[in-house]
Image (cartoon, rainbow, N blue to C red):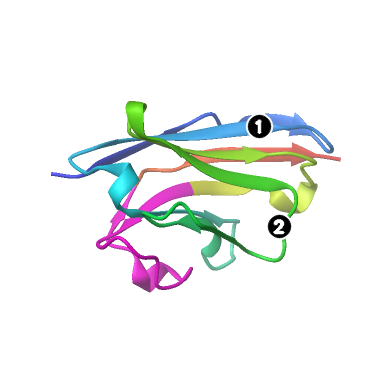
Amino acid sequence: QVQLVESGGGSVQAGGSLRLSCAASGVTVGNSCMAWFRQAPEKEREGVANMGSASRANYADSVRGRFTISKENAKNTLYLQMNSLKPEDTAMYYCALAYGRRCLGLTPDRYNEWGQGTQVTVSS
């Protein structure tokens, strides 16, 4: 049984940083396509970044250059380092897993397992 547990969300001022973590069980993070999504109130869930087994990262245009996705295989954990945060980054952030080693896209329908989310709030 796959479990994904996010942590690290919080409130920060614009320009600040946060690091989100996603602790996985029942799956090997290093061998899987893992991703971060976010959803703001009354908006659709959008892909932020993903990383497959080859550790190649893909980012949404809105976060490229500010966010970094990474994996720590020893801890079986996925991270999202978020720098230069903006108020428009405010959302619930979700960790997600797609079965398979390669990531085939950054849309929610490509992903099979989801965490419960962690809230990020950026004030101006």
Residue 6 drawn above or below residue 101? above
Residue at x 51%, y 42% (from the top left corner): 70
- Between disc 2 and disc 1, the foreground one is 2
Residue beneath disc 2? 64
Tell me if mark 2 has few (under 14), some (14-19) or many (20+) residues whose alpha carbon lies within 10 angstroms of its own: few
Residue at x 41%, y 68% (from the top left corner): 108
Give the magenta part as a residue range: 94-114
Residue beneath disc 1? 18
Which of the image's four quarters has the N terminus?
A: top left
Which of the image's four quarters has the C terminus?
A: top right
Distance between the alpha carbons at the discs numbered 2 and 1: 15 Å
Residue at the far front: name it.
54
Residue at x 40%, y 66% (from the top left corner): 103
SS under mark 2: loop
Q: Is residue 73 left or right of residue 28?
A: right
* Image spot of residue 88 (x, y percent): 75, 53
Residue 110 drawn above or below residue 117? below
At label 2, which amino acid type do we have?
Arg
Q: Is residue 62 left or right of residue 116?
A: right
Count of residue discs? 2
Looking at marks 2 and 1 on the same chain, the residue that comes earlier in the sequence is marked by: 1
* Image spot of residue 62 (x, y percent): 72, 62
**Along the viewing direction, whichever of 18 and 52 lies nearer the viewer:** 52
At label 1, which amino acid type do we have?
Leu
The answer to whether any part of residue 90 appears in the image is no
Q: Is residue 108 magenta?
A: yes
- Marker disc for residue 97: none
* Image spot of residue 16 (x, y percent): 79, 32
SS under mark 1: strand
